[in-house]
Amino acid sequence: MAVALTGGSPERFGYEWNVYSAIAPEYEEQFRRWLPFYSPADWAQKCFIDAGCGMGRNSHWPLCYGAAKCYAIDVDDRSLAAARRNLAGFVSAEVLKCSIYDLPWHEVADIVFSIGVIHHLEFPGRALDAMAKAAKPGGEVAIWVYGRENNGWLLWALDPVRKLLFSRMPVSWVHALSLAPAALLWLLLKAGLDRTEYFRLARRFSFAHLRSIVFDQMLPRIAHYWSRSEVIGLMQDAGLQDVEIAWVNQMSWAARGKKPA
């Protein structure tokens, strides 16, 4: 997912969204799993901010559901160009170059969300503070982040290699290298790998989509894997109340909190 901050990997995610810039139909189910608190009807006539929009895929669906206003922000020009193309058909969408740390709005949005961004930030708490500031009193802040639970194999195998090797390599090299692990994962899924709900979902993905996910895991400089209690703590530290949390695909966390009225 795209990252909007200094100290993260915005230019690396910009490369990703320049290569994988088309919105596929299966992205809708992913979006609805990442923010399971909302049905399509919940977005109708809402103003929302997509903080770290990447190529705009997660703004696309709320707009399809009837959202009244969208502010989609990122800092990489390639991500923003892809988002502008993908959201061009929605007159209520604005795609803006802006850091998640410095959202310019104060109490304007019904929903401020960030999918796949907070866990790549150097200062996640500061980003959540900015998101909470942009929400209306009584409005909501929602995030989706990597989970620590059930990801021991990633933390043991992939994460050290990412830190020591992939995060230091030119991103084009990382993309080339992603072909081999993506092919292995593709074969394992076809052979019946179904240890978690995520793998059962991934079985339905095209190879290109699967490779984009593998590449997405390999490229960032920063990647946090948080426990349930840590995610709740992040939300509460931002002053959010009535925090709800959901285990997504048995590998990650979605959280929603309300700004005090």
Image (spheres, helix red, strand yellow):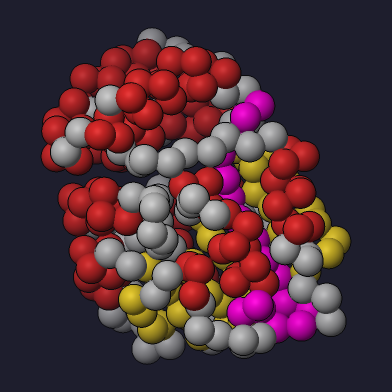
Q: Using residue 75 as the reference point, say whether residue 33 is left or right of it.
A: right
Q: How many marks?
A: 0
* Displayed quadrant of residue 75: bottom left
Instruction: Give the residue at x 50% y 68%.
Output: 101
Residue 188: quadrant of the picture = top left
Tell me where residue 154 appears, x and y as whole percent. 48, 22
Membership of 138 in magenta stretch: yes
Vertical arrangement, residue 160 with respect to residue 98, above or below:
above
Q: Residue furthest top?
A: 191
Front-most of residues 53 and 155 = 155
Residue 17 visible somewhere in the drawing: no
Left of 8 or right of it: where is 35? right
What residue lies at 38% left-to-right and 83% top-to-bottom? 94
Closer-to-camera residue (81/75): 75
In the displayed structure, 251 sits above or below 62; it is: above
Which residue is at 53% across, 60% downward?
114
Tell me if 108 is positioned left or right of 52 in this view.
Answer: right
**Quadrant in the picture for the C terminus:** bottom right
Q: Is residue 164 magenta?
A: no
Is residue 109 something one can see in this rendering?
yes
Residue at the image point whose x is 66% and y is 86% from the top: 107
Magenta part mainly helix, strand or loop? strand
What's the magenta region? 133-149
Q: Position of residue 46 (x, y in %)?
A: 61, 81
Q: Could you say where residue 9 lies in the image, as x and y percent from the top left? A: 34, 50
Q: Position of residue 210 (x, y in %)?
A: 32, 34
